[in-house]
Amino acid sequence: MVKNPVSLDAKATHKYDDIIHIEYPLKSSDIIKHPRMTVEERAKIFAPFAALKGYEEAITAKQKIIVPRIELSEEAKEYLDLQLGKIERLLRKGKHPIVTVVFFQKDKVNNEGEYIQFTGMVAKINRTSRILQIVEKRLQLDDIYNIESEDLD
């Protein structure tokens, strides 16, 4: 008799045929010791874990390109002011343009940082507090490097 058949033609042993269809747990005393887990509880056992704590954050930090802040020229400042004026006019008409903004986000450690591109719908603009709010994100007008939108042309 073949213990571990390799092909379908080989004779298979049915060592566990007598217990394969019995409901688990077998005894009522086992129920108290080890109650049956739900699928969600069993899934938690096999959930992934971070073997190296802080590894993902370190990789993300290495991917950042830290640069010094770029001073805008007078022409660039005028262009941004023009774009902000167009946004204000659209907001007064009840329209909320979708814009792509490149802004400077300062690093916590030093005076350098990174430039981030963000796209979203303009919620409001406040020139006195110098804040542009895009969806839930509030940006300082001084941190904005560029604003582009099809609605502003």
Image: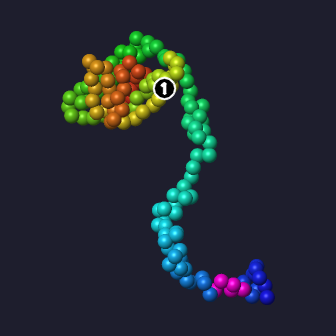
How many numbered discs sit on the rendered protein? 1
- Residue 99 forms part of the magenta stretch: no
Q: Which region shows up in magenta?
A: 13-17
Residue displayed at 45% across by 31% down: 117
Q: Classify residue 4 by image quadrant.
A: bottom right
> Which secondary structure class fits the magenta region best?
loop
Q: Is residue 142 above or below residue 56?
A: above
Residue displayed at 55% across by 80% down: 26
The picture places residue 75, in percent across and down from the top left corner, at: 40, 13
Viewer can see residue 152: no
Residue displayed at 43% across by 25% down: 103
Q: Quadrant of the N terminus?
A: bottom right
Q: Is residue 112 above or below residue 29?
A: above
Camera-nearest residue between 130 and 20: 20
Q: Give the image's coloring scheme.
A: rainbow
For residue 30, side relative to residue 75 (left or right): right
- Residue 15 forms part of the magenta stretch: yes
Mark 1: amino acid: Tyr
Mark 1, other Cα within 10 Å: few <14 / some 14–19 / many ≥20: many
Viewer can see residue 39: yes
Q: Which residue is mark 1?
A: 115
Which structural element holds mark 1? Answer: strand
For residue 121, side relative to residue 54 (left or right): left
The picture places residue 123, in percent across and down from the top left corner, at: 28, 33
Q: Quadrant of the C terminus?
A: top left
